[in-house]
Amino acid sequence: MVRAAKRHPVLIYFVLAAAWFWASLALDRVKGLHFWAPLVGALAPAISAIFVTAITAGEAAVRQLGRKLWQWQVGWRWYLAALGIPLAEALLAVSLAQLGGVFQVRRIDMVMLRASMPALWVTFVFAAAEELGWRGFALPELLRHNGAIKATLIVGGMHALWHWPLILLPRMWFSDIPVLPWTISVLADAFVFTWIIRGTGGSVMLVALFHGMSNIAMVFYNGIQPNWMPLVKCGVTVAATVCLLLATGPSLRWQTHKRSQGASP
């Protein structure tokens, strides 16, 4: 295990994270354990990343990985990007759906939204647990030997595949969502994650904020007719990623950051 992890750390990480998460979904089928399935599964990326880091690089590297969660001293523009991009995409999607006649405000359950407001912090906790693995561990490892675009597509592909049972299995959380547009959306979002990681010097906190806000912003998409929602979401996300690539180039970071940060992720 140790030798394999040192030679292929990202592969071993993904196998462990997928095995843990997919096995945890079995809890969803056990009476009385439905509540614990998402809690146990959400920890899979973080625990897998910590384990692989521990057996390949030792305690100091684990501490360094953990510090990425609290790396908050970045420019205010990165907070604006992490929290604002998902909302901007959602509002654009709503506007396009409204123009196309496929949006209805009453589809958004405002009562449910208000009731869940006090617990929104849980969304960011789950996002942090995921991103410690995907963007805190796997992405930097891949960036050591690959360009930003290739590394992004690999991590995005693994991240999408990791979620697939939630779509492909019956009676799961995403069972009513078509897998292709959803996967394309995840791959497109992966470029924004990489851009934030590279621009902030590896802050998992900031990508967790982006991840969590992306999940929260999905409430706006609920107003779009179900047969149109995945396509509109996919189109808006891809358009945003194209704009990002045009602005940053294949390095996925601003030229000012490229000169000042040098060897940052």
Image (spheres, rainbow, N blue to C red):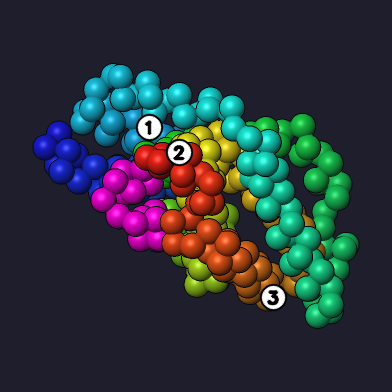
Image quarter (top left, top right, bottom left or bottom right) of the N terminus: top left
Specify whether residue 177 is painted magenta: no
- Magenta part of the chain: 138-156
Residue 149: tell me if it is visible: yes
Q: CA distance from mark 2 to mark 1?
A: 29 Å
Relative image position of residue 207 (x, y in whole percent): 55, 42
Q: Nearer the viewer, residue 184 or 16?
A: 184
Decide which of tag 2 and tag 1 comes sooner along the chain. Answer: 1
Dot 1 amino acid type: Ile
The residue labelled by disc 2 is: 261
Residue at point 40%, 60% (across, down): 149
The residue labelled by disc 3 is: 228
Q: CA distance from mark 1 to mark 3?
A: 36 Å
Task: Tell whether label 3 touches label 2 (CB within 8 Å).
Answer: no
- By secondary structure, the bulk of the magenta-drawn segment is best described as helix
Decide which of tag 2 and tag 3 comes sooner along the chain. Answer: 3
Relative image position of residue 217 (x, y in whole percent): 71, 52
Specify whether residue 140 is painted magenta: yes
Q: Is residue 179 left or right of residue 82?
A: left
Residue at point 81%, 80% (across, down): 100
Residue 265 bears which disc, if any?
none
* Mark 3 closeness class: few <14, some 14–19, many ≥20 residues within 10 Å: few
Q: Quadrant of residue 132?
A: top left
Dot 3 amino acid type: Trp
Question: Where 170 falls versus 27 (above or below)?
Answer: below
Q: Secondary structure at mark 2?
A: helix
Residue at point 71%, 33% (across, down): 119
Decide which of tag 1 and tag 3 comes sooner along the chain. Answer: 1
The residue labelled by disc 1 is: 47
